[in-house]
């Protein structure tokens, strides 16, 4: 019987060299470093599309986070994976550009830990998404400075990984615009 590839993550070392696969929940229970990606979609007003995770999600339900994120399949590039997941979660696709990558670790109250070699993918889109209700409870556009203030004032409303990757992404955007 063939394993269902979507339930697996790609385990990697600290240089992003693949080490094999592991069932997604097991990797999060054991805090194993694995490959992931985070998509940031902007509109022409330079606002970021945020999503509120579905209330039925097994971790961090109802929290706000970046446009979408997930894990690559063995046969996908980072861009292919980002486009696939953008369509699955938000109901649209657009061109994406790979920006930075880094390792982060974020434990959750339920005993799971995100320990990821994360690639940030950025794209532009000006229409409304058509989110999958099994993945997304709500969505909105926000300016980066407003997100920064809201995270500072209401950190409990955001996923732990978003608070980490938002800072990395914002720093990279500042560097690339100078």
Image (cartoon, grey):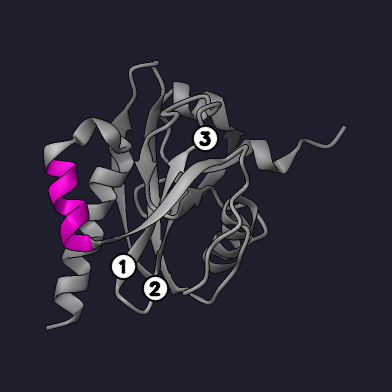
- Kindly report the distance in space between the C-alpha atoms of the residues bearing marks 3 and 2: 23 Å
Q: Which mark is residue 47?
A: 1
Residue beneath disc 2:
43
Q: Main secondary structure of the magenta part?
A: helix
As measured in the structure, the alpha-carbon distance from the residue carrying label 3 to the one carrying label 1 is 22 Å
Q: Residue at x 20, y 79 (%)?
A: 176
Looking at the image, the residue that sits furthest to the right is 1
For label 3, the residue is 54
User: Are there few (<14), some (14-19), or many (20+) residues within 10 Å of tag 2?
Assistant: some
For marks 1 and 2, give the CA distance. 6 Å
Rendering coords of residue 66 (x, y %): 38, 52
Q: Is residue 28 magenta?
A: no
Tags 1 and 2 touching, CB below 8 Å: yes
Q: Earlier in the sequence, mark 3 or mark 2?
A: 2
* 143 relative position to 68: left or right: left
Q: Which residues are magenta?
A: 144-152
Which element is circle 1 on?
Answer: strand
Residue at 33% across, 37% down: 159
Asked if 46 appears above or below 30 in the picture, the reply is below
* Residue at disc 3, secondary structure: loop
Q: For the point 77% across and 35% down, which residue is it?
A: 3
Which residue is painted at 15% across and 75% down in the image? 175
In depth, the one of 147 and 160 nearer the eye is 147
Quarter of the image that includes the N terminus: top right
């Amino acid at each position: 019987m063939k394993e269902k590839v979507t339930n697996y993550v790609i385990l990697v070392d600290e240089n992003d060299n693949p080490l094999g696969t592991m069932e997604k929940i097991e990797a999060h229970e054991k805090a194993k470093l694995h490959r992931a990606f985070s998509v940031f979609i902007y509109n022409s007003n330079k606002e970021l599309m945020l999503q509120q995770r579905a209330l039925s999600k097994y971790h961090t339900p109802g929290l706000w986070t970046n446009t979408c994120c997930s894990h690559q399949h063995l046969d996908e590039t980072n861009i292919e994976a980002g486009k696939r997941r953008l369509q699955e979660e938000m109901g649209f696709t657009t061109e994406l550009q790979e920006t930075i990558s880094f390792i982060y670790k974020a434990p959750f109250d339920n005993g799971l830990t995100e320990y990821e070699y994360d690639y940030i993918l950025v794209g532009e889109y000006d229409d409304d998404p058509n989110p999958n209700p099994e993945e997304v409870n709500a969505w909105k556009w926000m300016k980066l400075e407003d997100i920064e203030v809201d995270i500072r004032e209401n950190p409990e409303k955001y996923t732990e990984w978003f608070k980490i990757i938002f800072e990395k992404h914002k720093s990279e955007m500042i560097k690339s615009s100078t």
